[in-house]
Image (spheres, grey):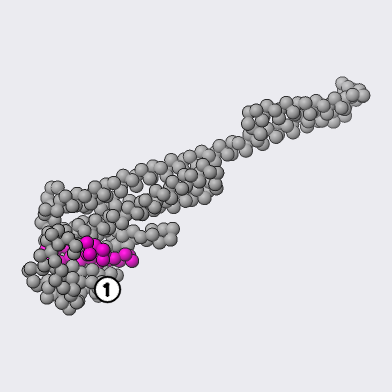
Amino acid sequence: MLVNSVAYRDGKKIADITRDEISTYLDRNDCIVWVAVRDPEPHELDLLEEEFKLHPLAIEDARHGHQRPKFEEYGDSLFFVMHMLEPDGDELRVGEVEIFVAKNYVLSVRSRSDRNFADVRARCEREPELLQHGTGYILYALMDAVVDRYFPILDSIETQLENIEDRIFAGTSPKANIEALYGIKQDLVTLKHATAPLLEAVGKLHGGRVPHLCTGLGDYFRDVSDHLGRINQSIDAARDMITTAISVNLSLITLQENEVTKRLAGYAALVAVPTLIAGIYGMNFDHMPELRWQWGYPLSLAAMVIIDSYLFYRFRKAKWL
C-alpha cells in the first residue's frame, strides 16, 4: 500500500523513510513526515489510524470510500476528501484521495486512481522556501494539483460539445447526436459533483476563521478557490449549451419531418388531379357531357397534364418539391 514516505525539516528533504521509521520521525518536533498510500486494505488502515492517531470518524470515511468531497476539522488535525477524475474510454473513472493533515504529518490515501502525486512532491521540494510554511503548504499543493487536473477534462468535454454542434448542422443522425449530448451531460454532472462541494470546502481555508495549519496561506487557497469557481462557471455554461443543442437538434428533426410532410402533400396533390378526372369519367352514367365526343379522351388527358404541370410549378416555386 505504501507508495513513498519522506521526512522534511526546514523545508528540505532529509530522508526517504521506511514503514518502520515513520513513528520515529513523528515523535520528533523538528520535522514533517509526508506519507502517500494507495488502495490500502482495511487492516492497513487500522495500522495507519494507530500510527498517526487519526480521528475514528475520519478513518471510517477513508475505510468506506465513495465520499462526497468535503473538509472536516478534528481538533488540531484536518481531513479532506477530493475526487480524482481520469478518462477511461468514453467515460470518467472517479477515484478518491483522502488527506489527513496535522502539524507534523501529511497522509494521503489514494483509491481507484492510477495517477500519483510524484509531480507534486517534486514541486514542493523545488520550493523549500514555501515548504517552510509546513503541512499547510503541502495540503495546498495537493489540492492545487487535483483541481488543475480537472481543466484538461473540461477542455475535452468542451471540444466534444463543439464537434457535436458542427455535426448537428451537417445533417448527421439526430439520434446519435442526442445520445452523444447526453453522454457529455453525464460527464459534466460527474465533474460538477467533484468541484461544487470542494468549492465550499476550500472557502473555509481563506477568510474568516482559518485553521491554524493554514495560517499565512490565504492567497494560495484563494487561488485554488478561484480555479474551482472558473471550472464551475464553465460547467454551468456547458450544461446550458447542451440544453440548447438538444433543443436545436429536436427543432431540426421537426423541420425535417415538416419537409417530408410537405413533399408527400405535394405528390398527393399531383396524383389527386388525374384521379379526380378519371374517377368522374369512370362513373359509367349514360348521360355525361362529352361522353361520346371524339376529342373527349385526349382533352381529359391534356387537362390532367396541364393542371399537374401547373401544380408542380407552384410546388417547386414554394420549395415543397
The percent coordinates of residue 298 (x first, y second) are 87, 27
Say if residue 267 shows up in the picture: yes
Rendered residue at 51%/42% (across/down) = 169
Residue furthest out toward the bottom:
20
Side of 194 relative to 244 (left or right): left
Magenta residues span: 101-123
Q: Is residue 190 magenta?
A: no
- Estimate how packed mark 1 is, as few (under 14), some (14 to 19) or many (20 or more) residues with alpha carbons within 10 Å: few
Left or right, residue 204 beside residue 249: left
Q: Quadrant of residue 238?
A: top left
Instruction: Look at 39% across and 52% down and name the residue there.
Output: 156
User: Which is nearer the eye, 141 or 109?
Assistant: 141
Q: Which residue is mark 1?
A: 1
Please provide percent x and percent y for residue 160: 43, 50
Residue 54 in view (yes/no): no
Q: Is residue 151 left or right of residue 6?
A: right
Residue that appears at 87% across and 21% down: 289
Measured along the vertical axis of the image, is residue 297 above or below residue 245? above
Give whichever of 107, 281 is nearer the camera.
107
| Residue 99: image location, x then y, percent | 22, 63
What x and y, as percent, mark residue 114?
33, 66
